[in-house]
Amino acid sequence: MPKPPAPTMTVAQPVRKEIVEWDAYTGRMEPIEFVEVRSRVSGYLQSIHFDEGQMVKQGDLLFIIDPRPFEATLNGAKAQLSQAKSQLSQAHAQMEEAKAQQKQADAQVQLADARVKRTRTLRVSSAVAQDELDQREAEFTQAQANVASALASISSAEAAQGTAAAAIEAAEAAIESAQLDLNYTRIYAPVTGRISREYITEGNLVSGGTATSSLLTTIASVQPIYCTFDVNEHQALKYIRLAQQGKRKSSREAKNPVYLGLSDEDQFPHMGHMEFVDNRFDTDTASMRVRCIFRNEDQVLVPGMFGKVRLPGSAAYEAILIPDSSIGTDQSSQYVYIVADNKIERRQVTLGPIVDGLRVVREGLTGDEQLVIQGLLLGRPGMDVKTEPGEIAVIEDGLPNTYLPLPAEEWISPGLTSITTPTETFQATPKKAEVVQ
């Protein structure tokens, strides 16, 4: 029986190139700032000053609550202040009158004291009658009583001054509170972002100032934007070991680059960097929440959207790449066939992730072999074969083959939001006390 002809195998040399292993995650977009706009005061919604779904700038007027009840309250508080000031003026006048009475009473005491002393002297020599002495002593006692009365009037005037001053402070506080409530009737955008729909229309009663205040609308910032995803314990430990070995800086300390692709994008055109790594693993999911940030200048990234995230999982190194079609699998290992001296040899390999459409070979190949890339099922180890040259195609995924942490001048700051339009660029720094929401 004639020997069957040797099968023909397509062979090619594995690809050797510098790569970075980009770990794949699925992330969700989150706004840096998300505000539920609620009123701080209750009243009827008088007017709405925005278009639903449009971009608003921080400080833009959104709603007006009917201000008339609050204007009346403010006017009443101002009237109370005027009344308290009048009471204080009256108390000052009472004080001056009481002091004048005290001076008059002091003079009367001095005069009565001199008269009673003189009368007592004359009475010793029987120059005056006893009735006159009794009258002078009574006048002295009356003068002392007048002094005590004047002192009491002074104390009463001081108390009236204190009461009036307290009434002024209370009235000023009432004015400040009423003015705040009046200011709160005009509701402004606390952040820059895209506004939602009107949850309450004009003419409806708005409940405000409580934990269950009426929700008027929401605002989500869009530029820049966060993307959050979870890292499992195995991956987190890998990053920790790489940092300990000096091969890759920890994302807690360095702004490692991150690339993002959307569901309709084959590559990863959106570049950002790591921004936050949580301090603990979630006990329910055994994963750690991490966050990256993107400029989102074209506003394509929308809060709530999913994205394909690529995070550097290694330092740049020279790797050996082969197609998955050249890999065989048995129950215990993975292997490839190589051809040496027209005979098939089996090599057990340890594989890594896919990079540029090819599989990384960690162990088992040097990159100089003639690898069988087609006809794997036709061969057996030790079999004589014929070969024909083939080519291993590298499909670029748009990710760089090396990277460095971003320098400080390229960091994306979450504290500054901006809106870029065809005619202008608006930047807003978050306001504090002057913003009414």
Image (cartoon, rainbow, N blue to C red):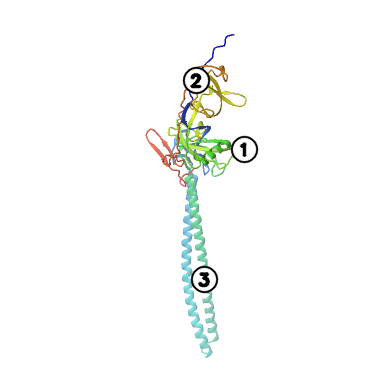
Q: Where is residue 77 in the image (x, y as percent from the top left)?
A: 49, 52
Q: Are marks 3 and 2 in contact (CB under 8 Å)?
A: no
The single residue placed furthest to the top in the displayed view is: 1
Q: What element carries label 1?
A: loop
Q: Quadrant for residue 343, please give it.
A: top right
Which sits in the foreground, 138 or 5?
5
Which sits in the foreground, 266 or 384?
384
Single out the mark in the foreground, 3 or 2. Answer: 2
- How far apart in space, not on screen, are marks 2 and 1 (Cα)? 49 Å
Q: Which kind of residue does numbered mark 1 sit on?
A: Asp
Q: Which kind of residue does numbered mark 3 sit on?
A: Leu
Q: Which kind of residue does numbered mark 2 sit on?
A: Val
Read off the residue under disc 3: 151
Which sits in the foreground, 101 or 419?
419
- How far apart in space, not on screen, are marks 1 and 3 (Cα)? 77 Å
Single out the mark in the foreground, 1 or 3. Answer: 1
Which sits in the foreground, 138 or 29?
29
| Above-or-below relation of 91 to 236 | below
Q: Earlier in the sequence, mark 1 or mark 3?
A: 3
Q: What element carries label 3?
A: helix
Density class for disc 2 (Cα within 10 Å; few <14, some 14-19, many ≥20) is: many
Q: Can residue 262 be seen in this view?
A: no
Read off the residue under disc 1: 284
Density class for disc 1 (Cα within 10 Å; few <14, some 14-19, many ≥20) is: few
